[in-house]
Image (cartoon, rainbow, N blue to C red):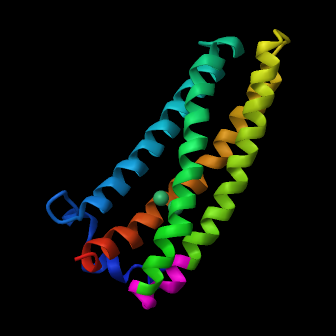
Amino acid sequence: MPAQHRWLLAELPRDRWSDQTLPPVASHWLAMHQGFRQAQAAMDQVIAAHRAGEIDAAGLHPRLIPTLGGFLQHLDGHHRIESGHYFPQFRRLEPRIQAGIDLLDRDHDAVHAHLEALAEHGRAFHQVVTSRAPAGDAARRLAETVDRAAGPLIRHLDDEEDIVIPLMALRFS
Ligand SMILES: [Fe+2]
Ligand SMILES: [Fe+2]
């Protein structure tokens, strides 16, 4: 993230983030993000097992699809609340952070395109498996889509925390 958006983090660095220094809404925000990271890690792990030949496409299905479904639903809802409710509030609260919020809003659009691709390839994989057709190609396409989405998503979570967690801690009081 460009240095110009990091001044709030300098006021409250990560090593001083704790339940004692953060308002409950900020702790909740971090917990949500941690849940997305855990879901991403769980998906990465089962995909790696599939690629290593430890589980076939039919075995991948029940390990991946429920996690992916919850991940997509929660992440979409989370972004809607951020862009629709919190970000406008942050812009009013701290006008100097406008450009940083613009960057996060653009991230949401970019991540959303990945979520749509994940939903599409997830559905395709599900249909092939439930029709008992060979599912190797659909599994590979879904796995590649998961790979492509991971980097932008994880970077967004980190960048967003660097801006909004100190903002909430320093201004929500
Ligand atoms: Fe976000
Ligand atoms: Fe977020």
Please indicate, yes or no, whether residue 1 appears anywhere in the rendered image.
Answer: no
Indicate the position of residue 106 as horizontal and vertical percent values: 64, 70
Q: Tell me what residue is drawn at x 50 percent, y 64 percent.
A: 82
Q: Which residues are magenta?
A: 93-101
Q: Is residue 42 left or right of residue 14?
A: right
**Residue 95 sits inside the magenta stretch:** yes
Using the rendered view, name the quadrant where residue 20 is placed: bottom left
Q: Quadrant of the C terminus?
A: bottom left
Q: Is residue 13 left or right of residue 100?
A: left
Q: Tell me what residue is drawn at x 50 percent, y 68 percent.
A: 85
Indicate the position of residue 34 as horizontal and vertical percent values: 39, 46
Q: Is residue 107 above or below residue 141?
A: below
Q: In front here: 92 or 11?
A: 92
Q: Is residue 25 left or right of residue 158?
A: left
Indicate the position of residue 12 as horizontal and vertical percent values: 25, 74
Q: Is residue 170 above or below residue 159?
A: below
**Residue 79 sits inside the magenta stretch:** no
